[in-house]
Amino acid sequence: MTGSFRTLIARLPLSLLAGVVLITFMVLGALLAPLISPADPLAQDLYATFQPMSAAHPFGTDAFGRDIFSRIVYGTRYSLAEVCICILVSCAMGTLAGMLAALVGGYVEQAVMWVVDIIFAFPGIVLALLILSLLGPGFFNMLLAISVFSIPVYVRLAHNLTQALQRAEYVEAARTLGAGTWRILYVHVMRNALGPILVQSTLTAGSVILAASSLSFLGLGVAPATPEWGAMMSDGRSYLGIDILPSLFPGLTITLAVLGFNLLGEGVRKVIDK
Amino acid sequence: MHCHCRLPVLLTALIACTGAMAAPAHAGAGAAGALTIMQPEPPRSMDPADQMATDTSSILSAMYEGLVRADADRTIHPLLAVSWRHDPQGTTWDFVLRRNVKFHDGHTMTAAGVVHSFRRLLDMNAPLAGSSRFRAVVDTVTTTDDDMTVRFSLRRPYPDFLLLLSFSQACVTSPYAGASLARHADGTGPFRFDEWKSSEYVRQARNPDYWGTPPDLASVRWIWSAEPSVMDMALHTGDTDIVGDLPALYARRMESDPRFVIHDDPNGPLYWIAINMDRHAGADRRIRQALNYATDRQALVHALLRDRGQPARSPLQPVSPYFVSYAPDPQYDPQRARALLAEAGSPSGITFSLAVQDMDEPLAEALQDMWKKSGITLQISRLEGGVYASEAFADPAQKAALQLDGVLASWSSGFIPDMQLRPLFHGASAAPAGANLGFFHDPGVDALINAGAVEPSEDKRKAIYAQIQEMIMHDAPAVLIYTRDTLVGMRADISGLVVRPDGALDITHVTRNRQPHP
């Protein structure tokens, strides 16, 4: 048993393992945040600001005397929520729209793909800024904005996959036997397209974190004092000349998280392609 | 597609790197007799009457002069006027002008020119940004038989009239400047306007025809950045010689460095939260007092100002000669705050929504955790400058629609108590008309403010203002937080800088030791 497990591990790509390890750390951090963090991420001590790294404060304290390590640990919850919600929304909507467009064809297909092209033409972050200036800042509005600009990738991918699958003999056969659009979509297309879409979603996870951090950095995301990584970097920016820790550690964490998701996506792709 | 997202993150990393590299400063900026000054804000206009901003006033005060000049300790000195007298009631003031003073455009200053300058300031038909406080005091400005005398007729006696005249809005502009004044300064000051490159710099050159002692500096360049770390870095690299309004955190690190000196002026702005009297939290005095007891001002001064400021114990700044504290002792008492909330029928605490400007957000964030200990949940809406101004000055109906319980604001009045208490606490100044942002209205306070403004006897004024302060501290229409010192960071070889009562920098007599005066 252990032997076969070992060989299985050995056959998996290194990037997948590294990605899984990093993401596991992140998930554990999010789940066990109250156990791991030494302090309340919101508790201030105005007489202990900008403390250096120590046993009590592994990453030091910020401008309000809050423990940076605890804030980063609690921040994983926000980052994972961002990733999960944005990917779920954009993947579900995008895939469905793309597959339906390809299956139905005609004007519907043209209309959907035009809309997608329009969204594609906008730089993602600009579109997000536009949406946030219309809806106002806030955590869920930010997630909505990121989801919207992540949709087109899935539409295109699903559309192309479906078009290729439609010409497969078994789909032709099912159609001849009288199967409806929804049945073909569910039984034949979706199951076969799942692999590439899964790869795509792990790959977008990294960019979701980056986009969310950027928007929070610009003050359009979470409410003040929320331990969100991008917002923490932004808060620390005013104090860079005095203490680099409040910006440095959230920045490193964002880097690691994005790296983790990218490695995971790369690994999944390798496994599926094999 | 997503590469755009990376930009802000990358940018920070870059700033961080340059910050680390900038530590060894090189020799310093500029040619002989040149000075560079960095301020947080760009200038709003080159017309002294059409602006109310401290940073703009600093730039303009090098090029314009008023009839009188005030020192940091608010003593008045002659400037364009050599002497003055007033009638016993204090409503008619005659100023005798200095002779042989030339504007930068070459014309000689006359009484008619000075009158033209003040009529422009007071013109109701073309209102300028800085005019309202002068219009409230000055009725007419006229020439007299003597062609070097200007007469001011006041609406009412105004004991601080000379101090008011020293403010940058009352600077004398050339009658020949016309509409170009907004972009091209034309005054009598020791420096003349050279170039204003929008979003980059304002450059000034020594005025060779200056009537007084010529300045030591040959040229001055004003630049701006709102980023504290950029200010700090520019001073270290020598890109600037003086930083106006340096954040206290950076001053603390700089004071131990022999290459720099910090000028600490205690006459800084007062920060306060105007409580909306029309909403639940503001309608009950016990809740207003609870908010005050929940505020640990000493801790805020320590963490946010690095002790370069004073906890607020009165609606007047501690530097004011009329300052009297009626603050409870101790001022910070979370137990008392909870008890007061329970008395007011909210034993489980209250929720308070507060509008703050971007740059004051740290103060609100600190209050949020502090007030939580007294059972007050603070909801912060952080607003960009323009949106903030429209919400802060919203009328009662708009504030009700926005569900705003309070507004965090700051105010600097330059020693004149009437300019502090009237706009912030007089019933007639209720927003949107004035800066009474919480709609506080007490007929007794209104009457005393009116009495204090016209009372010629210094002792009686002191008594009146003491009474106003006591009434306001007791009624607690605001959470008065702290006064922040104005800090100016400069290279150690610079001397002679004056911070005037209105907060503007006066660089007329600045000298640099590296280029000794011949």
Image (spheres, rainbow, N blue to C red):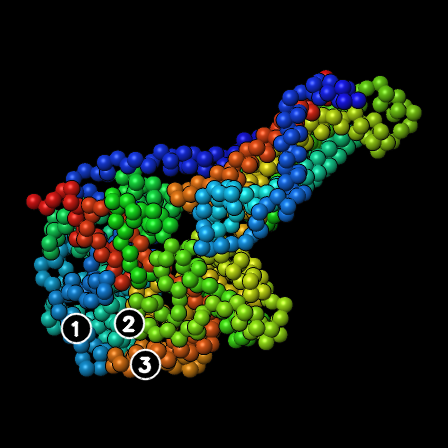
The quarter of the rendered structure image containing the C terminus of chain B is: top left
Q: Report x, y in % for residue B167.
A: 26, 63
The residue that mark 3 highlights is B463
**Mark closer to the observer (2, 1):** 2
The label shown at residue B321 is: 2
Q: Report x, y in % for residue B175.
A: 21, 58
* N-terminal-most mark, 2 or 1: 1
Residue at 21% from the left image edge and 64% from the top image edge: B70
Report the chain holding disc 1: B
The quarter of the rendered structure image containing the N terminus of chain B is: top right
* N-terminal-most mark, 3 or 2: 2
Q: Secondary structure at mark 3?
A: helix
Q: Residues within 10 Å of mark 2 (few under 14, many from 20)?
A: few
Report the chain holding disc 3: B
Q: Residues within 10 Å of mark 1 (few under 14, many from 20)?
A: many
Could you tell me the amino acid type at mark 1?
Asp
Of residue B225 and residue A239, the one placed in the foreground of this image is A239
Where residue A149 sits, quadrant-wise, is: top right
